[in-house]
Image: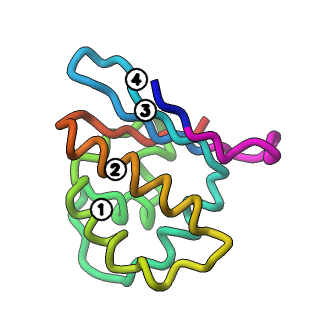
Amino acid sequence: MNIINLYTGYEGYAELVLKEKNDKNQIIFEVHLLDFHFYEILSLIPLGQYDRESVMYNYFQCKGWHEEEWEATKKEEFINQLNLIENKVPHNLLTIYNAIKQICSSSIQNKSKLFINLE
C-alpha cells in the first residue's frame, strides 16, 4: 500500500484522508493531510455549476465527506479542475496539490474507487 502522510505535525487538528480502494474494497493508496490544506486547494478552483456528486458541490454544501466516508465518483471532472489551477497553486501548497492529483490520477488509471473522509 502506498501512503503519503502530510498530516504529521498537525495532530490534534482535523485530518482528511483520501483513499483509493480496489474492487475488493482493499485500500491500495492513502493520502493523509490537514483538512484546511485540502480546502485551500479546492478554494483555488473557479466557481461554476457542479453536479451533486462532484467534489466541489460537496465542498460548498459541506456534505459528503463531512458526514461519512464519501466516494468521489466524478474523478475525471475533479482531475480536470485540478489541472486548470496548476499554475495558481502557491509554492507552499504544491506538495499537497501533487499528492491529491496523484491519488486521483491513480484511481482513474487503476479503475478503482476514490474515497474522502474526515477522520
Q: Secondary structure at mark 3?
A: strand
Sooner in the amino-acid sequence: mark 3 or mark 1: 3
92 lies left or right of 58: right
> Quadrant where the N terminus lies?
top left
Q: Please determine whether, in this image, residue 101 is positioned above or below residue 26.
A: below
User: Callout 4, which amino acid?
Assistant: Ile
- Residue named by callout 2: 104
- The CA span between labels 2 and 4 is 14 Å
Region rendered in magenta: 4-15
| Magenta region, main secondary structure | loop
- The CA span between labels 3 and 1 is 18 Å
- Residue named by callout 3: 29
Which quarter of the picture shows residue 39? bottom right
- Give x and y (percent) for residue 90: 60, 79
83 lies left or right of 73: right
- Residue named by callout 4: 27
Tell me the tag on residue 31: none
Instruction: Based on the picture, tell me whether residue 12 belongs to the magenta stretch.
Output: yes
- The CA span between labels 4 and 3 is 6 Å
Q: Secondary structure at mark 4?
A: strand
